[in-house]
Amino acid sequence: MSDEFDVVVVGAGPAGENVADRAVRGGLTAAIVERRLAGGECSYWACIPSKALLRPVELAAEVARVPGLTLGPIDTAAVLARRDEAVSHLDDSGQVEWIRSVPVEFVRGHGRLDGPGRVAVSAEDGSVRTLTARHAVVLATGSDALIPPIHGLAEARPWTSHEVTAARRVPERLAVLGGGVVACEMAQAMHGLGARETTVLARGGLLGRMEPFAGELVAASFAEAGITVREGVQVTKVERPRPGGPVTLHLSEGPPVEADELLVATGRRPATGDLGLESVGLEAGRSVEVDDSMRATGVSDGRLYAVGDVNGRALLTHMGKYQARLCGDVIAARAKGEPDDLPGLRDVADGYGAPQVVFTDPQVCAVGRTESQARREGFDVRVVEYDLGRVSGAYLQGDGYRGMAKAVVDERRRVLLGVTFVGPAVGELLHAATIAVTAEVTLDRLWHAVPSFPTVSEIWLRLLETYGL
Ligand SMILES: Cc1cc2nc3c(=O)[nH]c(=O)nc-3n(C[C@H](O)[C@H](O)[C@H](O)COP(=O)(O)OP(=O)(O)OC[C@H]3O[C@@H](n4cnc5c(N)ncnc54)[C@H](O)[C@@H]3O)c2cc1C
Ligand SMILES: NC(=O)c1ccc[n+]([C@@H]2O[C@H](COP(=O)([O-])OP(=O)(O)OC[C@H]3O[C@@H](n4cnc5c(N)ncnc54)[C@H](O)[C@@H]3O)[C@@H](O)[C@H]2O)c1
């Protein structure tokens, strides 16, 4: 069976769904191929379940800071049940219905490029359907958890983000390998939901991509909550004699760690290992490099695009969706022979530095460049820091509110290059920073954006005053 569409999208995660939607809005026809569940990792095994697990833990920490309120133990079974609701009990029928309503042809199966403009889809029953794209094939296949080559690790069948976000029980003793976002969020969630011993093994510090104080404040909060963080250690060998039984991690220094479960959170690799990239001259297993219109570079026919995790620009749902919107629009413009270089048709946001919220307690959020990135890139940098706990609105949030804010200023233009906030529930502060950084609002103009009293947003005033305004 052979089918022809204007656009064929491989992968129905948040990025793939959005690109198909925009292409159809632009007047094109589209098909989308999905091997697992429409909605992608984000909806079932990443953003949504992880945040459903973290929310009660965060709220419990908030309640504990407000005198006069008491909270009983968290009902873990109820939390897991709400998580199951949040992931629609791994049923994607609602999502498929929405895709069809766009209308986009939904094709279940594993998609592989079969030369330029062609995607061969293998269904579970072994049948193969070939889809042909008149204008574009868009790869939106996301990423998979990466298991580092440590002796005995793969054989120990550790949890990855998939298993921890779908957990049916909370392990008594959990070891977490990695110090990044998944490690921090999931250590916090599992500990808050009842793990008795949680040990994070980070070869560097925590949250190494952010400003250094972010990881330090999270580590301090983890210590208070009883989560052990062992920084600067390497796991040299893993032993798990009985499948599902206790696991022992041998370290480069200090005694081994024994746990009932091991979560590996050491980053991601692009889901391009079995995607037929070779058929268009690209290398399997690597990210698909794209230009600012999301068109794959190094593919001569110019009809291959890649959005979301698979292009390696920013491994975040909102950035994948942003890339997808502009990609769908640019494909439609090119198909109709319209101008394809309007401002809305280029990825500008990734160049500024993607906004991100880490949902630990305290939350960490940042947009733009860190100080060290800005210095490396040769900007004339000045840095302003302020203790968030000293802002009236923050103090009123609860006793012992601790946090920090940092702004990285380009002195030459007097605009913000980056902003980082760490503190309970600071995630909602981030969009103001994203607007300031992306719109390159000058500090002198920002001075006239008056934050309400007594909100945590008064941090903006304090940062500007500290700068000297
Ligand atoms: C635990 C965890 C928590 C996270 N939390 C957040 C968060 O709070 N906020 C945030 O912004 N980001 C978060 N992320 C990152 C976020 O999940 C990803 O950036 C996002 O899912 C990427 O979207 P995508 O559409 O590119 O890929 P995916 O969501 O991975 O979707 C890709 C889809 O393609 C399908 N597919 C792959 N190969 C094929 C093929 N050959 N044929 C057919 N289908 C295929 C897959 O089955 C999948 O459904 C988190 C990640 C993890 C692991
Ligand atoms: N709230 C959010 O926005 C959110 C939440 C979860 C994940 N994500 C996204 O998902 C992506 C993946 O998250 P992640 O935490 O897996 O990756 P990450 O890149 O954030 O962190 C990986 C961690 O593993 C460590 N590591 C790597 N190899 C190792 C090895 N061999 N031994 C020991 N440690 C090793 C690194 O030093 C780092 O601390 C991130 O890029 C992030 O953007 C976002």
Image: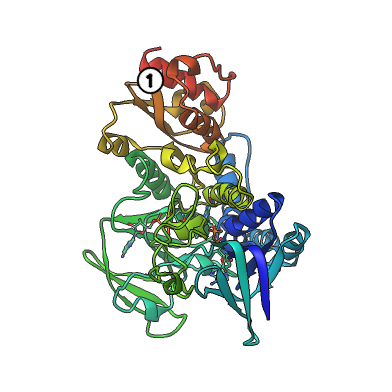
From the top left corner, tell me how far across and down residue 228 is, in percent: 37, 56
Q: Left of 97 or right of it: where is 255?
A: left
Q: Residue furthest front?
A: 337
The answer to whether residue 363 is seen in the rendering is no
Q: Position of residue 311 (x, y in %)?
A: 45, 57
Q: In this view, does 375 lie to the left or right of 169?
A: left
Residue 171 is at least partly visible in this image: yes
Q: In which quarter of the image is residue 47?
A: bottom right
Q: Nearer the viewer, residue 105 or 421?
A: 105
Q: In this view, does 189 lie to the left or right of 238?
A: right
Q: What residue is disc 1 on?
A: 414
Q: Which amino acid does label 1 sit on?
A: Arg
Q: Residue 282 or 333: which is nearer the viewer?
A: 333
- Name the foreground residue: 301 vs 260: 301
Question: Looking at the figure, which quarter contains the N terminus?
Answer: bottom right
Percent of width and height locating residue 52:
62, 55
Residue at 36% over, 47% down:
209
Q: Residue at x 55, y 16 (%)?
A: 450
Q: Residue, x 67% and y 69% (percent of image)?
A: 4
In-image side of 217 versus 162 (left or right): left
Image quadrant in which the C terminus is located:
top left
Q: What element carries label 1?
A: loop
